[in-house]
Image (cartoon, rainbow, N blue to C red):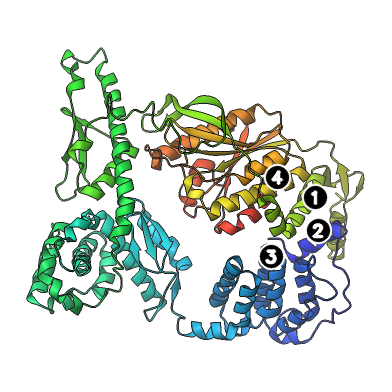
Amino acid sequence: MKSFWDKAIEKHRKGKGIKARTNRGPKTKASAIYGGMGEREIQLRLEIHLEDFLSTKKSVLSPAKALCMFNMQDQERFIDTVGNICDIDMELAYNFCHHGVESLKHLDESQWEIWVTEITKNYRNGGIDKSVQLMNDIVFYSNSLAGTATSIDFSEFSKTIESLLTGLNGRPLKVEVAEEIYTDTETIYLPERVSSERTKEENFHLIKASAIHLWAQTYFGTWRVDKEDFNEFENKEKAIKAYHLLETVRLDEKIKKELPGVGRILDKLNPKKQLKSISKNFNNAVNILSDQSSTYKESLNLISSIINDIDKVPSSQYAGNLKLDSASLVADERINQDKINFEKALDELHEQWKEVEKAPEESSENENSNDKTFSVSKENNDNEYDVALEFGDSNITPPENMKQIMESIIQDFGEIPEDYLEPAGEGGYDTDNENEDSDHDYGNSDYNFTYNEWDHARQKYRKDWCKLNVKTIEGVNNNFINETLSKHRGLLKNLNRTFEALREDEKRLRKQNYGDDIDLDAFIDAYIDLKQGKEVDEKLFIKLNKTERNVAVMFMVDMSGSTSGWINKMEKESLVLLCESLEVLGDTYAIYGFSGKTRNLCEVYKIKDFEEKYDSSVKNRICNIEAMDYTRMGASIRHLTMLLSKVEAKTKLLITLSDGKPDDVDGYRGTYGIEDTKKALIEARFLGIHTYCITIDEKAMDYLPYMYGKTNFAVINQVDKLPIKVSDIYRKITA
């Protein structure tokens, strides 16, 4: 963020310095008591942020006077926040100035930050009026927090919980906010705030126990139960409640063995002792489920023995709810896809094995390899996930992507079903015709291409592995462009000024020994040094640089299914602002979207080509950008690199806007997808193309430095900040 003086100097350079205001008062003495700034300095700094909004009827004199009664730390915090809110909306920032100072009296720093976040959230959901109402209700808000000072919010624990879950075995689990604690087998839902315990640490331990318990449900087989298993009970809801309770006991014992640290937390929360005292049946059930060899089947069998006493058991603090319907919907779709992916992977392994067996040095007894079948054997009876894949009499080491599929199948079934072990073969899974008819007939297909794909496990390319179609998005004429320009009119105005300055700066070399004009900044610095008795720099001139900007940039926009909704809208707004600013700057640019589903249906979508003008056709295509399928990045990068390499430019950039890492249904995820994407980026850099990624994935630090390099990416934590940040990032990387 630019400092106050940076902004003041910038406005001076543009001939738009702070106007003299008749109501600006003298510097007050009050601030000296608190060690802060005086009224006049505070007012000036607020006016720097709000200048474009202020008028003769609108001033910041009143909040400046009020801020004099606070220390320097509070003043700086308030003024910086005003600047941040200005990036969202000038009117909101002005109202914050007049209504927000009172909050400094009632809230500590952490509470204050939460309050500011809620103000911006209210603005997005309900507009200015809803935000101002929250500002005015500061006393009520403060009182409501008085009893929850030890609470912990989702924003505080979510990253830690996600990191913890990432380090555990099993299917990757996302963490999202919900009113209830539960899992649908792929996402863990946790509350926005936890406040039931006496201390913040205890509240964190409670939510940590919840997250681990929900992970254990997926890893240790709670969800292998079928809804029909409860049909025999007269009271189905009661039976499900009993099953959940029994599974809580069983899973807690599993967790204590796997994660002793979490086990100690569970011991404090554990209902085991209380359960044993309810009845002999409960005591017996606890003893059976405490055995490490117990499975979900034991829990099912014990339901009838405890169901009549289930109402005597208080609800668990950490186990959440068991939502069978939600889990079934998610699991059914995953199970079907896992089977397809596994059969395909077996088919590819089978083909590779036949090639090996055809080697001349192999004996003739291997000639009947086509008759051999795959099988699975357990390496360790204590761990159901420790299995080996065999082909005939030979052990097979499956590739990493296949291991992930196998683990997911075992989580759902406890084993690899026999009917999964037949390669697709002829008449089965036809990889050449897979998804021949796309669900999205999205515009007109222009060409067909094939691209290699890097197989990290084999350390070689799969030749002509990916089939890629290039399509032009059909435009729609709606009001999205005008709404975006209206919504961000203040931001766009500032961006255009910045990009104009960037264009001019590109032509002027500052701090030169000689030149065409005096460098005012260098002159002022030299004068200050002279007054302080320091050595004076003699580089006081500006020299005109005849070399114009010569930049070509390809924007690669993620159109995968995970960008639907708000993300998709923010992406489109970002593109509108970028295009408007780049038209001012004059850089050559193109915009393509990318998505796909399996290697046979990779797709890129032309939004704007390098030769096209930013006209109504391009604007209408931006309006019609929609979320599609998956994120297969390698083939798209290779194609767009090819297009960019043909452009005449001194500097070439490939900038990716994406919500996450490489992913596709046919095993293009994890190590395989990351390694192929990294290889494609290396190929681009070999051709002199600089690569950069802008993402909203908070887990990006786990993989982006590896793929793009430590300095060639930016993570934006809030989706609504995307339009603001993208243009700013572009300015920085091309300056």
Residue 233 is situated, as x and y percent measured from the top left of the image, at 15, 65
Circle 4 — which element?
Answer: helix
Mark 4 vs 3: CB contact within 8 A: no
Tag of residue 501: 1
Residue 101 is situated, as x and y percent measured from the top left of the image, at 67, 80
Mark 3 vs 1: CB contact within 8 A: no
Residue at mark 1 to residue at mark 4: CA–CA distance? 17 Å
Instruction: Identify the residue position indicated by label 2 in the image.
Output: 10
Sort mark 3 into few (<14), some (14-19) or many (20+) by Cα contacts within 10 Å.
Answer: some
Circle 1 — which element?
Answer: helix
Quarter of the figure that contains the C terminus: top right
Residue under the image location 15 percent in, 51 percent down: 382
Residue 624, quarter of picture = top right
Please state which of residues 26 and 370 is positioned toward the viewer in this rendering: 370
Residue 282, quarter of picture = bottom left
Mark 1 vs 2: CB contact within 8 A: yes
Please state which of residues 255 and 296 is positioned toward the viewer in this rendering: 296
Say whether residue 680 is visible.
Answer: no
Instruction: Identify the residue position indicated by label 3 in the image.
Output: 89
